[in-house]
Image (cartoon, rainbow, N blue to C red):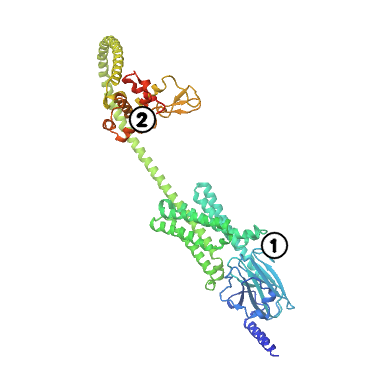
Amino acid sequence: MLFRIPVFLLFLSCFTFAVAQKPVVFNKKSYEHIFKSAEVYTLEDVESNLSFDTISSATYQNKFVPNKDYYPKNYNQNSSYWYRIKVRFDEDLDKSSVIEFFDQVTDYIDAYFPDENGNYIHSRTGADLVFKERLFSHKNFEFLIRNLKKGEYYYYFKVKSKDKVNVIIVFRTVERFIQYGLTEYLTYGLFYGMIFIFSFHNLLMYLAVRRKQYLYYILYIISVGLYEVSIDGIAYQYLWPQHPVWNEYAYGIALFCISSFALIFTKELLHVKQKAPFYFKLINAVLLLRLAFFLVCLLYNPDWFKYKFIEFIPLSIGFVTGIYILWRKRYRPARFFVVGYSFLFLGFVIKIVHILGYARHIPGALGYYSLSFGFLLEMVFLSFAIGDQVRILKRKKENAQKQIIKQMQLNAEMKDNLNRELEAKVEQRTIEVKKQAIALQQQNETIEKQNEELVSKNSLLEQQSEEISRMNVLLERDNISLKTSIEKVTDARVNATELDFEEFSQKYPDKEACYKFLAELKWESGYACLKCSHTNYCNGKVPYNRRCTKCAYEESVLHDTIFENNRISINKAFYLVYLIYNSKGTISSHKLSEKLGIRQSTCWAYASKVKKVMEERKKDLRGIGKSGWSKIVLDKKA
């Protein structure tokens, strides 16, 4: 007995709580009702494992709490939410009715309706199910009320969605549902018809004037249409009814296209690159970041498409760019652009307010379709902006044509005046020419006489020229002989005495002269490739190098000479060898440093190298005389 008392009290408390939920009363005059606020009780199923039998039991009745928002929401997308409504039919209703859910992105909705016997019938629908499984072929979710007899009833709904949704529950009679559905689809037809008309009109304009702004505008409004049909569920109904998984990508792809083509269209319409370079760079940066986010969502996690609020960033950038160009640059088409974006911005804000649960302050249709209204008004005013730009261009063209016509008239007048002036000048010039002709005739006679004298003088000059040519030939022979004598004297002096660097440099003035001497000395007996022994060669990359025409091996003129890997200038190296040889190795490194202007350590190292070669080739150099310095440069052991 004591055990039964707590159970009875618990049952009584559950019954008391259940009665506390006020019923929504319907009669034959009721044709539509939207459940909101405390008319809907909610229970969060965190583990998503509660069955209907469990939540409908007396134990769970007191766990349902009144909805705190204007419309219920699934704040935790990992949970399932149970919703309960209570209705009372004051009389038997003779009209069929439905319960409708509005938010088309809801993944699953399970409904439990009581029948005449008090048993509950289960029905299921949702965006993740194939479209043909719905009770009605409609973009929203509907459940047919099977029991309309007089009395009070509880209806249970289980909602599970990975997106945040507004659980808008509406009671409608079938007649009202048909009227509402036809009106809604007609409105959508008008909306998408306007998108089609705008697209077709701007396509014709693009084909006529070939301005890219029309093409970007077409892509933008087509993207708007794609987004609207995706978010309204119409695309799912008519385009991919067998593939509900596409619903997860469609609106995300459409939003990306809207943002991208809107910013590109903004750049093209307002000439942002010329009028606002900073905003041009900013728009490009936003486009790249938006593309990166889109690729991450598409390839990594499509659930991130639900973060639609990021579209506020490109929308704001385009809006601020239009305001800047209108305010600072006074570009007239920007006024319609700013007005259009203002409506879109306002629609976006109203939509956000509606999503955040403040719908009670906004009329239902305006809150739900605010973004569509914003897009529609934006398209109208963007068309005005394009038309205004065309009018400006037309006005400029007309002004340019007027200036051209005016300039052509001035040119014609100037041409007539110039013709008259030219005719007068031609007459005057003709008289002068006649006078000059008489004078020229007299001059011609004088010139003819002078020509006869010049002919006789020319014959004399030809004779003198022949004599000069003969003398030049003789002088040239003497010069060649003299040059040869000078070279012989210089060579003899080089080999006979010790010269200073300036005198020595006259014989070997630069690197080219030294390389030439080494080439003649090195290949005196003929050329043979070190790699393949081929005897034909061509010039190498460095002057006087020789490249084999067979294997392309290039041999340096310094290879296998005492100057290979030389670190001082070649003409100084020549002089150093010359001094060491003439002094028979007795000249000191200090003296060499003083004569050549090179560090004493370098002179010592190089002198040691030369002396070593002289010592090794002492027998070969015996009896050659002072000219033997040039014979040691080819020492291959150096």
Q: Which of 357 and 53 is in front in this view?
A: 53
Q: Is mark 2 on a helix, strand or loop?
A: helix
Q: Percent position (x, y) of residue 590?
A: 27, 33
Q: Can residue 502 be seen in this view?
A: yes
Q: Image check: 18 left or right of 269?
A: right
Q: Where 267 sits versus 584, above or below? A: below
Crowding at mark 1 (Cα within 10 Å: few <14, some 14-19, many 20+): few
Tell me the number on the disc at residue 609: 2
Q: Nearer the viewer, residue 295 or 242?
A: 295
Q: Distance between the residues labelled 2 and 1?
A: 100 Å
Q: What element carries label 1?
A: helix
Q: Give the residue type at disc 2.
A: Lys
Q: Image check: 94 left or right of 342?
A: right
Q: In which quarter of the view is residue 323 placed?
A: bottom left
Q: Percent position (x, y) of residue 154?
A: 67, 78
Q: Which residue is drawn at 69% across and 62% down?
A: 132
Q: Nearer the viewer, residue 124 or 584?
A: 584
Q: Mark 1 points at which residue?
A: 132
